[in-house]
Amino acid sequence: MCYPLPVSGQKLVELSQVLHAKNTAGEFTPDFSFDMDAFYGTYGDRKNAQGKAYYEAMNIMREDEEGRRQATALNFSFFNAPQAVFLFMPVFGDSVRTAGDVGMYAQTFLLSLAARGLGGIPQTSLGFFAQTIREVLGISEEMKMLFGMSFGYPDANAPGNRTQVDRVPIAESVTFHS
Ligand SMILES: Cc1cc2nc3c(=O)[nH]c(=O)nc-3n(C[C@H](O)[C@H](O)[C@H](O)COP(=O)(O)O)c2cc1C
C-alpha cells in the first residue's frame, strides 16, 4: 500500500528551502531508522565502493568535508529535477510488508520513467525529514514516509550521472536449485 505525493513548481521550491534549513540545523525527523554503520562485511564493502565511485566521479576527495557536504545538499535541491514524489504509507504491525509494497511501487515508477526517456533518483535522505515534509504538505501523522524520488529528464553530463554502479553478478547473488 503506497500513497505517492508528487510535488512540483513553487511548492517544491518552498520544500527545498525548508529541507536545506533543517539539514543545516541537523534537525532530522525520520519515521524509520536507517544506520549506515549497520551494513557489515561484504554489504559494507559494496556501500563504501559505491560512495567512493560516486564522489570520485564528482572529483570530491575523501578528506574534502565541504565538497561532501555540498554533494549531500544536492539531495535537498532534488538534484535540480522539476518534480519529486514522496512515498507515504499507513502503518500495520512492523511495517515490513507495507515497506515492500512501497519498494515495488518505486521500482515500477522508475522503470516507467525510463521507458519514457525520463529518469528518477530514489532518495533515502528525504526520509530523514519525514515530519518536516508532512508539515509542509499538510499530511496526517498517520501516514509515514519511507523515501522520496526526484525525477525529470536526466542530464547525462551531470557529475553524479557519470558513474555507473556495479551490479553483483547473478552467479554471486542467486542460488539455483533444480
Ligand atoms: C532506496 C534507495 C535510496 C537511495 N537514496 C539515495 C539518496 O538519498 N541520495 C543519493 O544521492 N542516492 C541515493 N540512492 C542511490 C541513487 O539513487 C542511485 O540508485 C544510484 O546512484 C545508482 O543508480 P543506478 O541504480 O541507476 O545504477 C538510493 C538508491 C536506492 C535504491
Image (tube, helix red, strand yellow):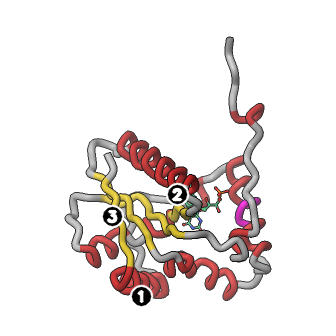
Asked if residue 21 lies left or right of residue 135, the reply is: right
Specify the quadrant of the image occupied by residue 44: bottom right
Q: Which residue is mark 1?
A: 17
Q: Which residue is mark 2?
A: 113
**At numbered mark 2, what does the secondary structure look like: helix, strand or loop?**
helix
Label 1 close to label 3 by CB (< 8 Å): no
Quick one: which residue is furthest to the top in this view?
178
- Is 5 colored magenta in this rendering? no
Quick one: which residue is furthest to the front in this view?
116
Q: Which residue is mark 3?
A: 5
**At numbered mark 3, what does the secondary structure look like: helix, strand or loop?**
strand
The amino acid beneath tag 3 is Leu
The amino acid beneath tag 1 is Gln
Residue mark closest to the camera, 1 vs 2: 2
Viewer-closest of 14 and 175 = 14
State which tag comes first along the sequence, 1 or 3.
3
